Amino acid sequence: MNKLFKLAGAVVLAVGLTVPAQAQTTIFGPGDLTTGTYFDYMKTVYSRAGLPEITQIPLTSFDKEFELQPLAAESWSLSDDGLVWTFKMREGLVWSDGEPLKASDYVFALKRAATTGYDFAWYWDFAGGIKNWKAITEGTMDVSEMGVKALDDLTIEVTTSSPKPYLPGVVSLWYPVPEHVWNEYGDEWAVNVDTLVSSGPFTVESWEKSNNSMVMVKSETYTGPWQARVDRIDIDPDIGAPEVGLPAYLAGETDFTNLNAGQIPFVEQRFPENMRTNVVFALSYLSFDVDSAPFDNVDVRRALWYAIDRKEMTETVLKGLAIPGNSLLTPGYPGYNADIAAMAEFNPEKAREFMAKAGYPNGEGFPTVEIFYRDQGGYNGAITSPMLQYLQAEFKEILGIQMDIRVMPTSDWMDALLNKKNNLFLAPYEFDYLDPSNFFGIFYDGGRHSYNFDDYDALVAAADANPNWEERLDLYEQAEMIMIDQAMIVPLVHPITVALVSDALSGEGIEPNALGFTPLNRLSFYFYTHLDKN
Amino acid sequence: MIAYILRRLVSISVTFFIVSVLVFLMMHAIPGGPFDAQDMPLSEAVRDKLMARLGLDKPLHVQYLSYMAGVLQGDWGVPYQSPGETVIELLARAWPPSLILGGLGVLIGVPLGILLGMAAALKRNTWIDYLASAIATLGLTVPVFVISMLLILVFAVWLNWLPASGWGEPKRWILPIIAYAAIPLATYARYTRSAMLDSLNKPFVTVLRAKGLSERRIIFQHVLRNSAIPMVTVFLPMFIGTATGSIFVEAMFRVPGLGSYFVSSITTRDYPLEMALILMITLMFSGAYLISDILYAWLNPRIRIGGRE
């Protein structure tokens, strides 16, 4: 008996020595928002919880060079009239509960969004141009009339009301909703771990509700492109604040962290190799109520346009936080036009001339104005305060304008902007999809800014529907010339984010792209699937 | 005494009702709602649908009455920011970490503060007094997030003795408890010092000394008890304030507690949670003052409760 035990012991020992313990790789990282409700991008975008984007597979997505890549959609084609798109899905994709992922799950996602109130509804009208979308969201048309159909289990047909040549990029934010799970639990399927199912490279293992930190594990059922290379991801939104993130990084509790302005010099000195910068495809700009005094006078707006020294601003108070915003589009963004950017000129004499021409020589008689800006964190929070104080001093010195500054929550700011409760705003905008129409559209008739410049609107409408890329760029150039001539807005800066990345991480996700920028988790699907950890 | 307590309970109910009306009105008077336009305009149709889902399309008095009817039956609603659970479930989940850390912070900070204050009062104008006063002043004036940051830097990053943040094993509790203890410690050190000095200068101390009582008995049996009134007054409100969490400490140490909900319920216009938190605090403070009043009578029999002889 004793011998038997010894033998068994030896066997166990031998097996134990020959089969190495499987090392689990876990990436610890910061999340974005501590508050949030549904883990469902198609239910709510602005108050979604955690990072549903990496657990569901969109039809397409962007890599770090911002090249469009097919994901759930294997290929797509466009009808001759430019209105009907047919997306062919990859075979063999399944939900994490084993059910097949079907075209109808995508169609269901949009139909539910249109009929139950979706805070991102504007996108599918404005960027997607989906036929009858608007009428359906307003309840004046039945959802069966929507220009989105599942032809069979693997084919989706999308009809747009006008040609949308950039639709394949737009559908990078089109995620499926598991209709079979929804039928059982309703929208509540996405509020606790037990009922969540995923179609993408990761599935949720645990969800701490108090701050929406989540542990996600590699999906065992995902067969599509961009598979997870690590076993687990532990994302904690509290680490998203650089004040918490850097100490956590130094204590080895996170693999990467965002940095704030005060931390950058320290990190530059200590860990220069581990720093990553990214120019966000975003613009901070001044916008006006162009229908009320004093900004209804184009010469006043032109005076402000010439009074901004972007170079000095970004080399002093915004050092490491932003680059000059010389045009609507950011360098590297599709359609960026260097000739247009070169026109952004700091010219105090011209600025003063325009002030005088408007009837306010040296600012005499000009009313005190108040600029509204919104209180927020992230890269915008870092730049707003120093930038506004800089502008306040510069406007005073160059134009004799007294500008007061007022901060408010985002929702109040948006309300003031839409309902014209003030005449001067500091406005930020980050891209939602990669096409010039995204930025040009926010000033288009009925967009975010209630501007109505007919020439501009006509050019933007023509450019939007034109399938020829070169012709479109030409139309957008003309539109931006009008924007500059009318000083519709005053572009200020493009913000930069700076992050610190641990040596334990490797892979394309943390390597700079051709422009030298590393978007990191701003491209979350690409980032988390192109990472290894030692 | 019983009649007094009953009378106080009635007045607490009235307070509760008045606070509920006031908070409800103030909450809805703040412009905006749970579904405001973020980066792009939200169409009227979409907003209407979202508001109707939460019953926010009904007139205000109807919303208030149906809310209070629920509260009286123990149904505090579902928080808008966490649709998968009820308000009660949210409190049951988020409060314990705050209660443990904040409660321990007070329970550790207060005795240490009293000791520090006593030492300062008894060794007045010596280096002990100066050191104690310096600690107390720093504890009150240095913001808690700076203290937290220093604790993390020294104990987690430099010395590597303790984890920087997180929740779970008790060793992760140590740094946040110290951060929490700073304010009770400093407050109590100052209160104890001034209350003790006040009592020490009273004629009865001279009488006791003349009677030949030992200094130890004078201090612990007479002076400390006579100085206890202000300390009792401060204790319960401080306990409530601390044990309901601090947004700063919890954010710095990544504690899944209640603190952040006080702010997020307002910024996200999470009406059910906002009401629940404020009404809960109202009840706790009302109860705390009732208990303090009863304790006064016990500590100093000359205080007659109820005002009627």
Image: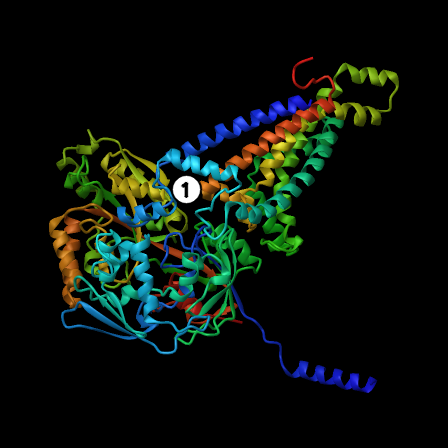
B155 relative to A291 in the view: left or right: right
**Residue beneath disc 1:** B269
Where is the N terminus of chain A found, in terms of image quarters? bottom right
Residue that appears at 15% across and 61% down: A463
Residue B113 image-quadrant placement: top right
Q: Is residue A425 above or below residue A256?
A: above
A5 relative to B43 in the view: left or right: right
**Place of residue B123 in the rendered image (x, y in percent of width and height, measured from the top left):** 75, 28
Subunit that carries the residue with mark 1: B
Where is the C terminus of chain A found, in terms of image quarters? bottom right
Residue that appears at 19% across and 51% down: A444
In depth, the one of A260 and A522 nearer the eye is: A522
Q: Residue furthest right?
A: B212
Q: Is residue A129 above or below residue A347?
A: below
For label 1, count other residues whose C-alpha is less than 10 Å away and answer few (under 14), some (14-19) or many (20+): many
**Place of residue A122 in the rendered image (x, y in percent of width and height, measured from the top left):** 27, 54
B48 relative to A500 in the view: left or right: left
**Place of residue B61 in the rendered image (x, y in percent of width and height, measured from the top left):** 39, 33
Q: Is residue B215 above or below residue A384?
A: above
Residue A499 image-quadrant placement: bottom left
Residue A431 visible in the shown view: no
